[in-house]
Amino acid sequence: MALVSNRTRDIKKFYRMTFEIRKTTPAGNSGSLVLHTLLVNPSDFAQEEAGRGSVVQTLGGAYVQDFGIGLPTVTLSGTTGYSTRTSAEGKKLDGYEELINFRARVYRKFLQANDPAHAMYWYNWEDDEHYEIQPQDFRVQRNKSEPTLYRYEFRFTCLRRLAKTRQEAASDYLTRNPSTKNVADKLADNVSNIGMFMSKVTGR
């Protein structure tokens, strides 16, 4: 018997991570400013969820100060690839263009705006995790032996989990990004537009 089902393998081949920047107007309406799906899945992914409890030892014994779970921190690292590929948003990008888009349009754009009306969201389709996030740092490496290959490390803190599943989040995303539809049809997933998804989840 296979250790991993074919469906799980297909999901891991297809689903990548998407970042979105949204802005809320004074009237309470929310609109998407940036929607970026990674061109290549990260080679390394670490998500740390620390507890906020501590054990205090006294002469009479010990007691626990438990403040629940802390905010998750995520570190993504990998490369942006060599060859030209078609992104989930239907754009043809090479590794350099992907790096520029990811760093400038996602990381820098959000932090340079410094606008409380802006919010950034991370959609981890593969693991069914969706969060509002705060970027912490972005690191780029390039080696002279591979001058056209860009390696990156992106670290961020998850502020709030969005309580929707992959199936509820993705069909509108496919409507918005038709280039991914043929692959998604093979997965037999009913997935729905990130804009609608975000409106329902965040009320923004």
Image (spheres, rainbow, N blue to C red):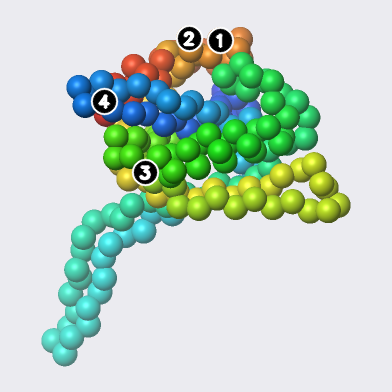
Q: Vertically, is 197 above or below 123? A: above
The residue that disc 3 covers is 114
Q: Disc 4 marks which residue?
A: 25
* C-beta proximity under 8 Å, tags 2 and 1: yes
Which residue appears at 63% of the width and 30% of the height?
Answer: 39
Residue visible at 71% across and 36% down?
Answer: 96
Checking the image for residue 60, the label placed there is none
Q: Amino acid at mark 2?
A: Thr
Residue tagged by mark 1?
178
**Foreground: disc 3 or disc 1:** 3
Q: Quadrant of the N terminus?
A: top right
Indicate the position of residue 33 as horizontal and vertical percent values. Answer: 43, 25
Q: Residues within 10 Å of mark 1 (few under 14, many from 20)?
A: some
* Mark before the other along the chain sequence, 1 or 4: 4
**Could you say where residue 164 lies in the image, as x and y percent from the top left?**
33, 27
Mark 4 belongs to which amino acid? Thr
Which of the two residues, 167 or 43, is positioned nearer the viewer here? 43
**Residue type at mark 3?**
Asn
Name the residue nearer the viewer: 143 or 50: 143
Q: Secondary structure at mark 1?
A: helix
Task: Tell us which disc is closer to us: 3 or 2.
Answer: 3
Q: CA distance from mark 2 to mark 1?
A: 6 Å
Labelled pair 1, 4 in contact (Cβ < 8 Å): no
The mark lying in front, picked from 2 and 4, is: 4
For label 4, the SS is loop
**Disc nearer the start of the sequence (3/1):** 3
User: In the rendered image, which residue does mark 2 sit on?
Assistant: 175
**CA gap, disc 3 and disc 2:** 31 Å
Give how far apart the Cα atoms at labels 3 and 1 are. 32 Å
Q: Please, what secondary structure does the residue beneath circle 2 have?
A: helix
